Amino acid sequence: MTEKKMPLWEVFIRSRNGLAHQHCGSIHAPDAEMALIAARDVYTRRGEGLSIWVVPSAAIVASDPADKDMLFEPTASKVYRHPTFYEIPEEVGHM
């Protein structure tokens, strides 16, 4: 008998309205419905969540950390993307 591996799912939880879903972990489950149930049981024991997303890990495409310079270095030369050259008036407070 061959052992069938269960797919790995990535779990994202939104804790409150207006906030983005955040990755909270991974879980093995045979399908999306079971992944949702398992994610609820494992990651929202204290009622932390408002909604849960489960995504097959195989569907996620990620960059290689070795490609960091190639992917992110060009933004360093665009100073207009880093508005640190002016002072914020105190009346504004935290932005």
Image (cartoon, rainbow, N blue to C red):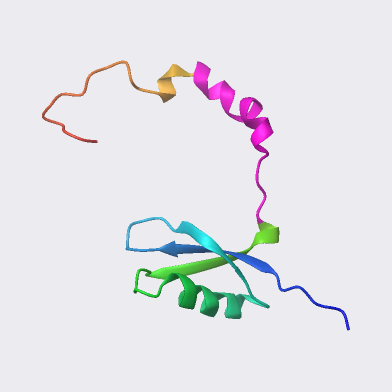
The picture places residue 29, in percent across and down from the top left corner, at 64, 75
Q: Is residue 63 magenta?
A: yes
User: Which residue occupies 58% across, 75% down?
Assistant: 35
62 left or right of 88?
right
| Image quadrant where residue 8 sits | bottom right
Give the total of numbered labels.
Answer: 0
* Image quadrant occupied by the N terminus: bottom right
The picture places residue 72, in percent across and down from the top left corner, at 57, 28
| Front position in the image: 75 or 69 | 69
Which residue occupies the extreme right position in the image? 1
Q: Is residue 51 above or below residue 33?
A: above
65 left or right of 82?
right
Principal secondary structure, stretch drawn in magenta = helix
Which residue occupies the extreme left position in the image? 91
Q: Is residue 30 magenta?
A: no
User: Which residue occupies 44% across, 17% down?
Assistant: 79
The picture places residue 32, in percent across and down from the top left corner, at 61, 75
* Image quadrant occupied by the C terminus: top left
Q: Which residues are magenta?
A: 60-77
The picture places residue 27, in percent across and down from the top left corner, at 59, 69
| Image quadrant where residue 81 sits | top left
| Image quadrant where residue 14 sits | bottom left
| Front position in the image: 7 or 14 | 7
User: Which residue occupies 35% across, 56% down?
Assistant: 19
